Image (spheres, grey):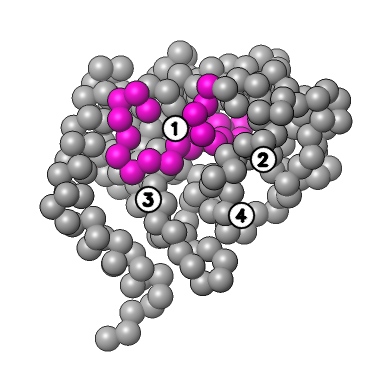
Amino acid sequence: MNLPKRTAKNLRRALKRLTPRKLARAQLTRRAIKRFADEIGFVYFGVISRHDEDYRSIRGYTASATKVDEHYCVGTVNQYDVVLALRSDVVELKDDRTANCHWLIAVIDLHEKKDVPDFYVGHDSRLEVFESHERRVTSLKLGHVSEYPRQFLANYRVFGRAGQALEIESIFTPELATVVATHFQGASFELEDNVLYMYLDTEFPEKSQLEKILSNGTWLAAQIDAKLA
């Protein structure tokens, strides 16, 4: 029987996760995330149906028909409504190559609902995956108003619509870029429809990573809200 290309890839991915070592690590990860959710007052759903009234779709550039979301949690951190989940997918790259991707994602609703441009700030190590998705954005050259730190420019790229570069710079300033470069430990983020998406590439996140993505994400959301206000 010949399976469609994407279906066959996802089947191989599922079978690969059934090795004893993977199963053991997955079990430890489930316990760690559930324990962490309990500690901070989040509700842990694990795998949740899209028809569940508590389900909220996680959008952003990682959204696809083949993604799998696990360890779905919801709660409030620093007065921000947050969804936390672990997403995996097989992403088709250029030259018929594929990549097994795993993202720890924090979804944070901004308080301000002004009309702001969508943009993505990505670490260089994951740009190939981001650029494999069909996006109507381009890599922006920053620094029209103020100079951006070299450490940020050496490791990160910003994507958005060319005509909105100055507006994006007014939100994501050199001061914020400095903090991202020095404290975000390779995480990337995206602003889409007044929702902040924080991404950390990891298949088996540890407690320190869970704490980091929430603290960084809510801090960044507060900074963006302050600029929009």
Q: Disc 1 marks which residue? A: 106
Residue 142 on image: x %, y %? 78, 34
**Sequence-first disc among 2 and 4:** 4
Q: Disc 4 marks which residue? A: 131
Residue 16 or residue 149, whichever sits in front: 149
- The amino acid beneath tag 4 is Glu
- The amino acid beneath tag 1 is Ala
**Sequence-first disc among 2 and 3:** 3
In 3D space, how far apart are the residues under numbered discs 1 and 3 (Cα atoms)? 14 Å
Q: Disc 2 marks which residue? A: 157
**Mark 1 element type:** strand
**Mark 3 element type:** strand
In 3D space, how far apart are the residues under numbered discs 1 and 4 (Cα atoms)? 21 Å
The numbered disc on residue 88 is 3
Residue 114 or residue 130, whichever sits in front: 130
**Sequence-first disc among 1 and 4:** 1
Q: Quadrant of the N terminus?
A: bottom left
In 3D space, how far apart are the residues under numbered discs 2 and 4 (Cα atoms)? 11 Å
Residue 54 on image: x %, y %? 34, 36
